[in-house]
Image (cartoon, grey):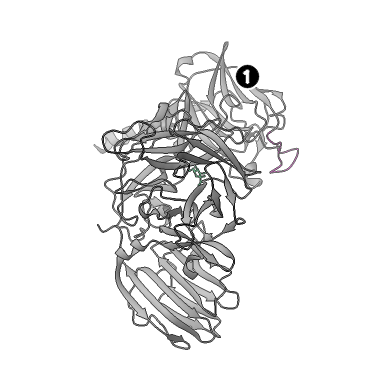
Amino acid sequence: MKTILAITALLVSTTVCADELLFPNSDFESGTLDGWTVQGEAFQVQPTKGDNTAARNRESANIQGTWWIGGYEKYNGKEGKPGAIAGDALTGTLTSQEFTIKRPYITFRIGAGNLPDDVGVRLLVDNESIELATGVDEETMVVHSSDVRAYVGRTARLQVFDNATGGWGHINVDDFRGTDIPVRDTSKDFAIDDAISPSGYPGIEYDQPLRPQFHFMSKKNWLNDPNGMVYDGEKYHLFFQHNPKGTGWGNMTWGHATSLDMVHWKQGDHALLPYRVDGRAGTIFSGTAVIDHNNSLGKQVGDTKTMVAFFTFAAKPKFYQAMAYSTDGGETWTYWNEGRAVVENQGFDNGERDPKVFWHEPSQQWVMLLWVQKDPGRVRWFTSKNLVDWEFASDLMRDWAFECMDLVFLKVDGDENNTKCLIYDASFDYEIGSFDGQKFIAETEALSIVRGNYYAAQTFNQTPDDRAVQIGWMRGGPDSAKLFGVPHNQQMGFPVELSLKTTPKGIRLFCWPIKEIDSLVEQTHELDEVTLGAGVNALDDIKDLDLVDLEVSFSPGDAEQVVFDLPRVSLRYDVKKQVLYHSGIDNNGAPREDICIDKLVPREGKVSLRLLVDRLTVEAYAFGGATFAAHYIHPKHGPKKLSIHSVGGTAKIHELSVRELKSAWEF
Ligand code: FRU
């Protein structure tokens, strides 16, 4: 048995190794263009020597050997210096000598512009020109094999071409070989070619020691923006940007989870998968879902209202906005008009994206808000009666606005008769104003409320009681799948309720963890006045904590620091600097101290904070949610002992409540 296995292994490795140059210098390792003919400007100073993309602080080019074709580079070992650039504007071709195709695959490395027809590699066989590949919109080359079985025995030439002059208008290639089997790096591909399974990982549990216990994340693999947040009359739906094929970003698909209370979530099968239409492959970027309460689309089946999702179809060369609908409460979906545009690209930016759609009761119509341009920032409003035909309404020009626009109507100080419109973007810069069904009129300047890892948040559409509940993606931090023994990477922040309050500075936004967190409370420890001084630890009586919801109000007094040593994270308020720091983590996984909330100025001598600590994160809300922050922590570099104490003087705690939470995953 052993011998047979050994022979098979040998056979496989011989097959894999079977490759050869297509002709001398098809790998550019002579350091010259021998065997190649240059036309135009794009390939004049080539081949380039060494990892020049890295030399100019971009991603590594992933080269083979020393020499390669880097269309943006201008260092050929003689002229210029590593990292010198030729830019995107040059065009031209690089055509090889003739060679005979002997093997079924031509395998090579390719990177830079993903611009089919404009930059790439083609095969010239007699009068035929066969486009083999374009780049991947990254300098890093990936290995690609083209199937040339139909041409074995024929004489051919390769042509590297660059007709593009704008962004990503260059091509990187290296190491052309004939191989017996295809070699394929799918990590940068749209996954449409090798079908994504819609399965939402039924076999995977939440019991890994460092799995977040009261924050939503995908059971497995990568997650980013929340999408399509909507209440269907019974359940909350949270769709999310998801890579079903790995723990890094890619293959954008809408994952799907539902909940009765926005705290306990059940992940189901993926809802919207990448598709191909009219010869264009694309993935599903961010967007909204609405419940078609008045059957505007005319697709309702029985009593179940249609759920309609609007998303960005991320396809080359230009993104557009498309729609899908579900007549069974979000279980199965149909792409409207096979996924063609409901809103065509508006012509400002190829990457316009992330439609927000909502029902505007006063004007009795559907409204769409869409980011369409950067520098100058342009946000476009559309209106529709039937969810299919969208009319331009107005443009809002705002330089702060970028990606994932959202808006929500909020009562000021709870007053039914005083509703304002809050509009914000992915980084949660916001303005408060009014919306008349056509345009937004600002009543504040641009403001901000959040610090740290919080991005692309959106609010639930059509919530009961008109509550505005928001969930944001905790963007950044290290890859938890690589570091912490969990099958996922990235998570959401804890849901917050938004409200508008009158403050001495005018009307301002407040964000506060939703009250449903109470369902997780197992035990509450409450303390009144405690003076923190030498040897005093306000948590002395608490032996063990894991998941924490802590509220405190304290006067810093003459202390230098007030320190909160909690499970896995230490926070310290630096009294002089008026900054709250926490023990954090950098994007590579190294522990570091980080600013949790800056400009934390006591009010009437007091600081009030709420802290949520989960396995990989801390969230901090100051002064009832006037400011908040969401951060990743290093779960293995926390304090040794639970403690709240002062350093360098005496501080006073006025109120302290420590709520021990249980996992949201125990149903
Ligand atoms: C924001 C974003 C969106 C886009 C999505 C793609 O994080 O860039 O603009 O739709 O992510 O995953």
**Residue 392 percent across, percent down from the top left:** 56, 34
What secondary structure do most residues of the magenta stretch adopt? loop
**76 drawn magenta:** yes
**Residue 656 percent across, percent down from the top left:** 40, 78
Q: Nearer the viewer, residue 374 or 634?
A: 374
Compared with 324, 160 (above or below) is: above
**78 drawn magenta:** yes
Quadrant the N terminus occupies: top left
Q: Quadrant of residue 469?
A: bottom left
Please tell me which residue is depicted at 54% across the width and 79% down the height of the picture. Answer: 604
Q: Nearer the viewer, residue 228 or 180?
A: 228
Q: Circle 1 sits on which residue?
A: 97
Q: Is residue 146 visible?
A: yes
Instruction: Report the magenta residues as a range.
Output: 75-88
**Residue 139 percent across, percent down from the top left:** 59, 39
Would residue 515 appear left or right of 633 to someone viewing this image?
A: left
Tag 1: residue type?
Gln
**Residue 326 percent across, percent down from the top left:** 34, 36
Would residue 527 appear left or right of 583 to someone viewing this image?
A: left
Compared with 174, 514 (above or below) is: below
Q: Residue furthest front?
A: 417
Quadrant the C terminus occupies: bottom left
Kind of element beneath mark 1: loop
